[in-house]
Every structure is written in C-alpha cells, then in structure tokens.
Image: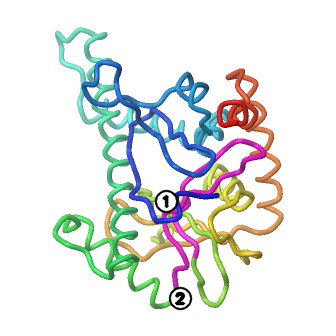
Amino acid sequence: MFLSAEPHTRELNGDGGHWYYPDGRSLHTVQKKDGNGERNTTLADARKLGLFPSVTAITKVIANLGLDRWKQKQILETCINNPIGPEEDIDEYASKMQQLSQKKMVDARVFGSLFHNAIDELNKTGFLDSTYDEIKPYVKHYIQWTRDNAVTFVDTEFVCVNERLGYAGQVDGLAVINGKLTLLDYKTQDVKLDKKGNLKPNYYDSWVWQLAAYKNADWYQKPARIQQVMSVVLCSQSPCYPIVKVWKPAELSKAWKIFKASCQLWQLTNNFNPAANAKLVHK
C-alpha cells in the first residue's frame, strides 16, 4: 500500500503546507504552468489530485498561544535592537521590523530542518560529511544521548497516513529507547534557563496533538504496539544535551480527541473532505 517505505529527506516549502497522496508519496510542490520551476502545492491542487493535508496543517486551525507569544516576542526584540530613526517613516519602519523578525523565524525553521536532516543522515550512514559542519557540535550531544539511553532506531523520517480521516505526516523516528518501542518527534528550541540556572524548555500542546495523530495513522510495517511517545527537545541557542518528555496515556487520549475535532474543523472551514475526495479521484 505505502509506496514511500524509504526514509525521506525533510523538505522545506516555507508556509505553503505539506500534501501527500493516499499511498504516502509527498507532493509539497508542483510544476508551474509555464514550466519555469515549481510552486507550493495548494488546496486547489489537492482537490484535483486527491491529496491529503499534513498533520501540522490541520493543527494550525487551533490557536497556538505559545507560538503566537514567541512571534510577538521576536517582533518586540527586533524593535528594541533596531530603534526607529528620528526622521524615519513609521510605516516603512514597521515593514522593516516585520521583515527582520520574519528572517529570524525563517532562520529557526532552517536550523531545525538542518538538525533533523543531520540526525537522519547519521542514523542511516553513521557519519556526517562537511555539509553538516555547522551542526556537528549540536549533534555531538545527541549522539551521547542515544548511547546513554540505548537508542536503536527501527525507522526514521517515514510517512504515516490515516485514510479514514484523510491526513498524513512525516514521522521523525520509531526507536527502541531503554527497552521501550517509542514514537518520537524532534523539536528544536531556543531553550531558556529557569531561576536555578537549569534549562527549561516549553512543551506545547500542539506537540502531543501531532504525536497522537501519527500514532493513530498507518505506515509500512507498523508494529502492533507502540509503548510510548516522546518529544525530544534539541537546543538551538547553543549545543546541549537533549531534553525529553514522555507523554502520559491520558495526555495522548485527550490529544487524539482534540486532533479529530480539529480535523473536522479544518474540513468544514476549507469545504473539503480529503478522504472522500481521494476515493473519487483515485477510483
């Protein structure tokens, strides 16, 4: 059923959204009409081609207060570090500050993608070439974490699909960690220190919504039982030892209910049922 049984290199297409065929193949970009390059796949393309939206696209229908606060903070810090000039036009200044703050957000996504790709490359080949020189000091701590916790990967960067609800997504990894079969997801973050000087990451609700959606989807050679799901925080501000959170069964159960509700809301607001549409397109 799943044609995408091999690990994928994580793709970036900005905020265009990720889309998948029901068999797990990704189609995040499509050819432009004039044949001059590619563009982001759209909802209109999904209707025509019978595609499924990504898990993260669906969860975005719910306000992410933590992410919103982080974006607001980036804008405020940008303004503080770049005060308006005495004769500078307020509208031009506002536009410039928005662009500068957006750059930091884009840089954060690029760093996260590079870190993800480095881990996947390491898991597949056992080494990193010069492409990853920038990230190697960070990966060093990740390697130590895998050794300390007897991490053995079953699969990495694979696509999961739920044909009944009509969604798909790319899973970071399935591994045995300290003897437990674990579905895991990496999150890069600028981790701050608490009052005692200890690293204290922010754990967002959307993380467990995402993991619950993955756990309740299917993929090639999916095991009968997954013992735990885990978020692995990778520091972006400086190299540090990974910080993990194992989500409790009650948290997962609630997250799955929330995701199913958000899936319905996404379909209603977009007037699009991906599962039903795919059956018509691919019959």
Asked whether residue 75 appears in the rendered view, the answer is: yes
Going by the numbered disc 1, the residue's amino acid type is Lys
Asked whether residue 200 appears in the rendered view, the answer is: no
Name the residue: 56% across, 31% down: 49
Going by the numbered disc 2, the residue's amino acid type is Asn
Q: Which residues are magenta?
A: 151-174
Q: From the viewer's perspective, is residue 170 above or below residue 165?
A: below
Q: Which residue is mark 1?
A: 187
**x then y, percent, for residue 224:** 76, 75
**x then y, percent, for residue 51:** 59, 36
The N terminus, quarter of image: bottom right
Q: From the viewer's perspective, is residue 230 above or below residue 171?
A: below
Q: From the viewer's perspective, is residue 3 above or below residue 178?
A: above
**x then y, percent, for residue 30:** 40, 32
Residue 168 in magenta stretch: yes
Q: Which residue is mark 2?
A: 149
Instruction: Report helix, strand or loop for mark 2.
Output: loop
Name the residue: 34% across, 71% down: 121
Question: From the viewer's perspective, is 97 left or right of 40?
Answer: left
Distance from the alpha carbon under mark 2 to that under mark 1:
18 Å
Q: From the viewer's perspective, is residue 142 above or below residue 41?
A: below
Nearest to N terminus: mark 2 or mark 1: 2
Residue 215 found in image quarter: bottom right
Tell me whether circle 2 and circle 1 mark residues in contact (CB < 8 Å): no
**x then y, percent, for residue 226:** 72, 74
